[in-house]
Amino acid sequence: MTQHNVSTTTLKRQKQARKEVMIERALELFLVNGIESTTMNDVALASSSGIASAFRYFETKHHLVVATATLLWERLSLEVTNSIPHSFEIYTGLEQVAFMLSLFKSFYVKKPQMFRFLEQFDNYVIAHQLSEELLDGYEDKVLLFQPSMMAMIDKGKQDQSIRTDVDTQLLYLTMTHQLMSLIAKLVLRGHVLRSDDLILGEAQLDCVIDMITSYLKPTHQ
């Protein structure tokens, strides 16, 4: 490799490293201050960079926002993988699904700001009408869980721990949307009414997870 090629490679790595730092700092700011309230200048200052550098790495704030959401899902995917026990393969399909649903509650307790950010991100996408092309990479990360979760449901159908008369994809979407919607309610709007404090969020999640798993069991159980 020539000296010129080495220098070019080094510069590319340095540029990528600076870009990754900017994404990290932006995510930190978005989690604390909110997406709409954080400016590109805020991100540049937090990254020890100039505003010109910020727009050199990211054409618009939209591109940076999508990059931070993508990073969040990458981290979430890694945490889910690291949370799965070694004996997971010998679980029944229903036990596997129940475990995965329990992770929603675990992340709600440990990382409520993550769900707050995801709700804000959805609202940001709608408010600014972000294009499907811009969201392609983000969607790929979000859908990483779908094949494995659907495989767990199908495994449950085969080992008879899950009823066979349910549509696998419909069930997956319903379960995840129900839990994500409830968590969004709890972390964003949980204290609108005094009655919202009467039942703890964890208890509500336990109730929904129990209803889902009870619904999944074959009628003869």
Image (cartoon, rainbow, N blue to C red):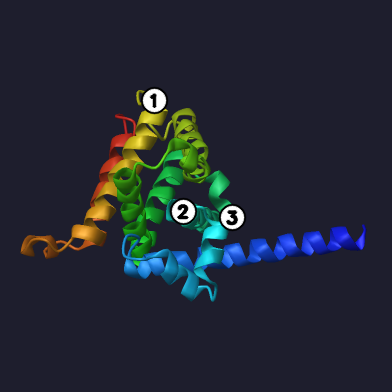
Identify residue type, mark 2. Thr
Looking at the image, which residue is at 53% across and 65% down? 52
Task: Estimate how packed mark 1 is, as few (under 14), some (14 to 19) or many (20 or more) residues with alpha carbons within 10 Å.
Answer: some
Indicate whether 89 appears above or below 170: below
Residue at numbered disc 3: 86
Answer yes or no: is residue 118 visible: yes
Secondary-structure class at tag 2 = loop
Residue 134 lies left or right of residue 212; in this view the side is right
Secondary-structure class at tag 1 = loop
In this rendering, the label closer to the viewer, 1 or 2: 2
In primary-sequence order, the first of circles 1 and 2 is 2
Identify residue type, mark 1. Thr
Task: Estimate how packed mark 3 is, as few (under 14), some (14 to 19) or many (20 or more) residues with alpha carbons within 10 Å.
Answer: few
Looking at the image, which residue is at 43% across and 45% down? 95
Residue 87 lies left or right of residue 17; in this view the side is left
| Quadrant of the drawing holding the N terminus | bottom right
Residue at numbered disc 2: 60
Residue at numbered disc 1: 164
Alpha carbons under labels 3 and 2: distance apart: 43 Å
Looking at the image, which residue is at 52% across and 73% down? 47
In the rendering, at what x and y percent does residue 189 appear? 18, 58
Identify residue type, mark 3. His
Indicate whether 187 appears above or below 139: below
In primary-sequence order, the first of circles 3 and 1 is 3
